[in-house]
Image (tube, helix red, strand yellow):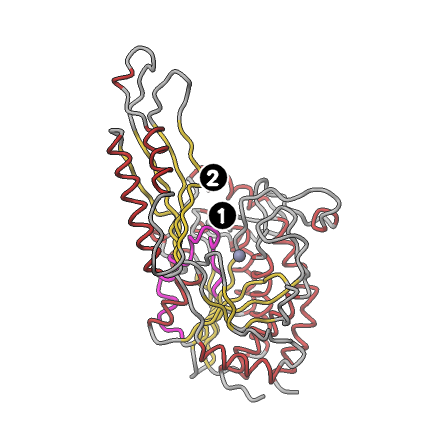
Amino acid sequence: MNAYEQLKNLADALAPRLTADRRSLHRYPETGWLEMRTSAIIHERLTSLGYACLTGAKAVKPDERLGLPDPGTLRRHAEAALAQEGTPAAFLTEEMRQGITGVIGELRCGEGPVIALRFDIDALGLTERADEGHRPAREGFASRNPGMMHACGHDGHAAIGLGVAEALMTLRDQLRGTVRLIFQPAEEGARGARALTAAGHLDDVDFFIGNHVAPTRALDDGDVTVGTWGSLATSKLDVLFTGQAAHAGGFPEQGRNALLAAASAALALHGIPRHSGGQSRVNVGVLRAGTGRNVVPDRAEMQVEVRGETTKINRFMEAEARRVCEGAALTWGCGCQVTLAGQAEGQRSDPELIRRVGEILRETLPDIRLSSEQNARNWGSEDISIMMNRVQARGGLATYMRTMTDMASPQHTAGFDFDEAVLPLAVKVFGATVLGLMGVKK
Ligand SMILES: [Zn+2]
C-alpha cells in the first residue's frame, strides 16, 4: 500500500474523532484573541503527537495583534475557559490567558520543501439558534459561550488541522521536508494574520496552502476548488470622536458636539469617490454617541470598514476615510482618533501551484471531484491574503482552496451547520497535497 492509500485509510478511520473534535470546539466557541481553550486543546494534541510547538509570543507578535478585547474580557474569558469541560489546563499558558493565542506545530523530516498549512480557529460574535430544528441544539453541541458561535466553519478547520497533524505524523517516515501547521487566531475581522506574519512564520515557506469550507452550489460541480482569487482588501477602522460636554440649555456655546462630528463623518464617508481602478466599498456599521437629551455629547464611537478590489484601491479608501474623519472632527471642534482594528489584502492563488495541486489530487484521490473552475472568484475579505502575499513576495507559491459541503443555513447566520463528511475529505486533500509536493511516489 502506498502512502496515498494509507492516508485515505487513516482519514476514514479518523472520521469519528474529527466529528468529536469539531463538536467539542463548536460547543465552546471563542472569538478572536479569546481562543484559549481552543489553543490549549491544539497545543496538547500537537505536543502529544510529537510536534514541536510554538505558542504565545513565539507564534504571534503581540504588538501586531489587531482588535484586541479589553483586559477585563480577557480575564473573565480565561477563567471561564479553564473551568470548561475538556480544557487541558496544563497547556493553557499564561500568554494564552493574556490573549496571545494561536499555535504552530512543526514536523521536520530532512531535506525538502517547507510546506505551511493554515487553519483558522476563531468563532463569531453571534448567538446560536437554540431550537430543536437546529441540529447542534438538538444533538447537544450548540454553543455554551453566550454571544459566540462557530458560524463560519472554523471549528471544522481546526478539527481538520488536528486530523492532518495525526495523519502526517503517522506517515512521517515517507515525508521529505518540513510541515508547518499554522492554527491561526482572530481571522474574523481580519485581525490575526498580520501578527503571525510579523513573527516570521511565512518567510521561508516554499508552498502555502489554505482552505475554507464553502457551500455546495447547484452550479458548482465539484468537491474541491484548488485555487481562489480576488477577495477584497480591507481595513477596519475604530474611530473615536471626543468633544466637550455642556448644558444644552444653559451653556451650549461651551460644548463641542462629538455626535455631530461623527454624524457628519458618517455621511461624508459614504461620499468617498468610487475608484476607476476597480471595485471599492465603504460602510459605517456602528455609531454610538451621547449620554442624555439635555447634554451636548462629548464622545462618539464609530466602526467603519473600507474595501478595495486591490490592496492599492483599499489604501486609497483608507486614506480618504481617515481624512474625512479628521476633517469632520475639525469642523465641529472635536478630537479624532482612528485605530486600525483589522486588515486584509488582495490575493491571488498561484496558477503554477493550482496546476500542480490539481494534478496531484486527480492522480491520487480520483474519487474526489475537482471543480471545473479551478481558480474561482472570492468576494468578502480574508486575512489569509497577508500570509499568501508574504510567501509570494519571498518567492514561494500559495493557494487558497475551497472544500464544498452542504450547509443548513448560510455562513455567519445563527442557524449555520455543515455536513461533517467534509472533514475527512479535507484531511485527504491536505495530506495528499503535502505528500505530492514532497515528491512522495504515487
Ligand atoms: Zn471563515
The answer to whether one can see residue 280 in this image is: yes
> Which residue is more in the foreground, 271 or 110?
271
Relative to 1, does residue 327 appear above or below in the rendering? Answer: above
The furthest residue to the bottom: 441
For disc 2, the marked residue is 73
Question: Badges 1 and 2: C-beta atoms under 8 Å apart?
Answer: yes
Three-letter amino acid code of the residue under disc 1: Leu
Q: Say if 358 sits above or below 56 in the image.
A: below
Type of secondary structure dominating the magenta stretch? loop
- Return the x and y of residue 122 as percentages of the image width and height: 52, 53
Local packing at callout 1 (Cα closer than 10 Å; few below 14, some 14-19, many 20+) is: many
Which residue is denoted by mark 1 in the rendering?
Answer: 34
Categorize mark 2 by other alpha carbons within 10 Å: few (<14), some (14-19), many (20+): few
> Which residue is located at x 74 percent, y 50 percent?
139
Front-most of residues 171 and 268? 268
Q: Could one spot residue 60 in this view of the protein?
A: no
In terms of sequence position, does the residue under pointer 1 or pointer 2 come before the other?
A: 1
Span shown in magenta: 182-205
Residue at 41% from the left image edge and 51% from the top image edge: 281
Report the side of 243 relative to 147 (left or right): left
Establish if 371 lies above or below 186. below
Q: Position of residue 334 (x, y in %)?
A: 27, 30
| Amino acid residing under circle 2 | Thr
In the rendered structure, the answer to whether residue 146 lies left or right of residue 140 reads left
